[in-house]
Image: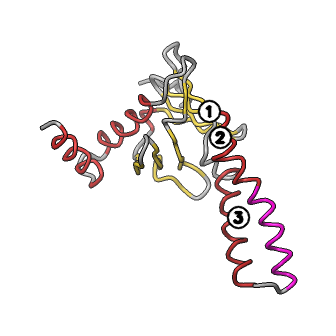
Amino acid sequence: MSTSSLGQVVRTDEDVTYTYDGRRYAIDVLLPTYVSVVACVACALLFWAGVLRLLTGALFVVAVYSMFNAWVAHAYPRRVTLGKYYVAFESFGHVDEYPIPAIRSLAVRESQGMRAYARINGGGLTGGRFFLPCSDLRDADGDDAASLYRFLLDTEARLDPDGLRVRSRERWAQEDGR
């Protein structure tokens, strides 16, 4: 449909790139990730020295998980491009592209303020899962990523119309429409 014979995405002039607000990205992603690096080293040293081993071991695991999400799983994209035929997530120089026809499943967990956790094609430990604060993502005109948020919800509804979250959203929409 919209991919080349090699399965590559086709770019159009209608593509919209949303970029995480720089200040918010620094506070929400960079700061916790770099603090995790320091915490990881400190916890390892304290654990080795025998200081509160249970606590330092648990904090070490949390710090490693935080770094893993940022640098290996690329779960916190700095930029998201929504095209007519694909969606792409860029994090720390790594880009995950998904041709829309190749998206077989999409699970979206919503939070307040257009925040979403999305798992594409099942999402795994090392990719396919993204934390998307759509209210902090902006296009070139300064508009928030409401269309990206709507795309995620609509795609989930199209792929899994009988899903519990989809039915719940439909119910709430009907009640709000009264």
* Residue 22, percent from left and from top: 67, 34
Give the farthest residue toward the top. 13
How would you classify the magenta stretch by its main secondary structure?
Answer: helix
Q: In which quarter of the image is residue 95?
A: top right
Q: What's the amino acid at mark 2?
A: Tyr
Q: What's the amino acid at mark 3?
A: Ala
The Cα–Cα distance between marks 1 and 2, rounded to whole angstroms, is 6 Å
Cβ atoms under marks 1 and 2 closer than 8 Å: yes
- In the depicted structure, whether residue 57 falls above or below residue 24: below
Q: Residues within 10 Å of mark 2 (few under 14, many from 20)?
A: some
Say which element carries label 3: helix
- In the depicted structure, whether residue 132 falls above or below residue 69: above
* Magenta region: 35-49
- In the depicted structure, whether residue 30 falls above or below residue 54: above
Return the residue at label 3.
63
Cβ atoms under marks 1 and 3 closer than 8 Å: no
Q: Residue at x 45, y 37 (%)?
A: 102
Q: Residue at x 41, y 51 (%)?
A: 109
Return the residue at label 1.
21
Q: Residues within 10 Å of mark 1 (few under 14, many from 20)?
A: some
Query: N-terminal of the two: label 3 or label 2?
Result: 2
Q: Residue at x 54, y 17 (%)?
A: 141
Say which element carries label 1: loop
Return the residue at label 2.
25
Is 169 magenta? The answer is no
